[in-house]
Amino acid sequence: MKVVIQRVSQASVTVDAKIVADIQKGLLVLVGIEDADAQEDINWLCQKITNLRVFGDENDVMNLSVKDIEGEVIVVSQFTLHALTKKGNRPSYIKASKPEIAIPLYENFVESLEKELGKKVQTGIFGADMKVLLLNDGPVTIQIDSKNKE
């Protein structure tokens, strides 16, 4: 499971001209799922995301987590995080899970993140054509792959 985490001042997701998610200060989490992903990946990533110290303290040093600041989170499914670009110019998405595998894992990821965070997490709509608007704060953008825990 791969995630791209962006610290945001605000973010929203629109589907068919309707806003389905809208937050202020917090994290936008793009998540890509592959067939090899399991509950262990979900648990590790959710703990990592909620405790990642990327928000400034009173000295403007990144010492606070989204939990510490009581920030908000949007999770958006993003199969393109598993793009393979080694050959040619057209990315291959063969490693990305098909919906029958990805949807239950995605839903479990959101539920697990809500438990870790202690509050509701907003989401996009799995598989929809989404327009994601964000104001990246910093900018701070972090990539994490649950298969590479170094």
Image: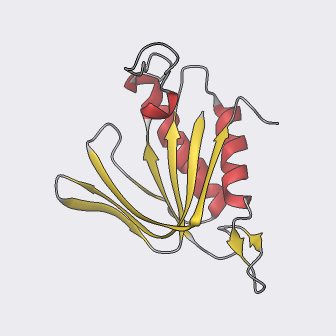
Image position of 72 (left or right of 47)? left
Front residue of 104/20: it is 20
> What is the total number of numbered labels drawn onto the structure image?
0
Residue 92 is situated, as x and y percent measured from the top left of the image, at: 42, 18
Front residue of 44/108: it is 44
Image position of 140 (left or right of 20)? right
Q: Is residue 33 above or below residue 119?
A: above
Location of the C terminus (image quadrant): top right
Residue most toward the left?
17
Residue most toward the right?
150
Location of the N terminus (image quadrant): top right
Residue most toward the top?
87
Residue most toward the front?
88
Q: Is residue 25 above or below residue 12?
A: below
Q: Is residue 86 above or below residue 23?
A: above
Image position of 97 (left or right of 117)? left
Q: Is residue 92 above or below residue 6?
A: above
Residue 124 is situated, as x and y percent measured from the top left of the image, at: 36, 51
Q: Residue at x 29, y 48 (%)?
A: 130
Q: Residue at x 73, y 42 (%)?
A: 44
Quadrant of residue 66 within the rendered picture: bottom right
* Colour setup of the view: secondary structure
Residue 62 is situated, as x and y percent measured from the top left of the image, at: 75, 70
Q: Residue at x 50, y 21 (%)?
A: 84
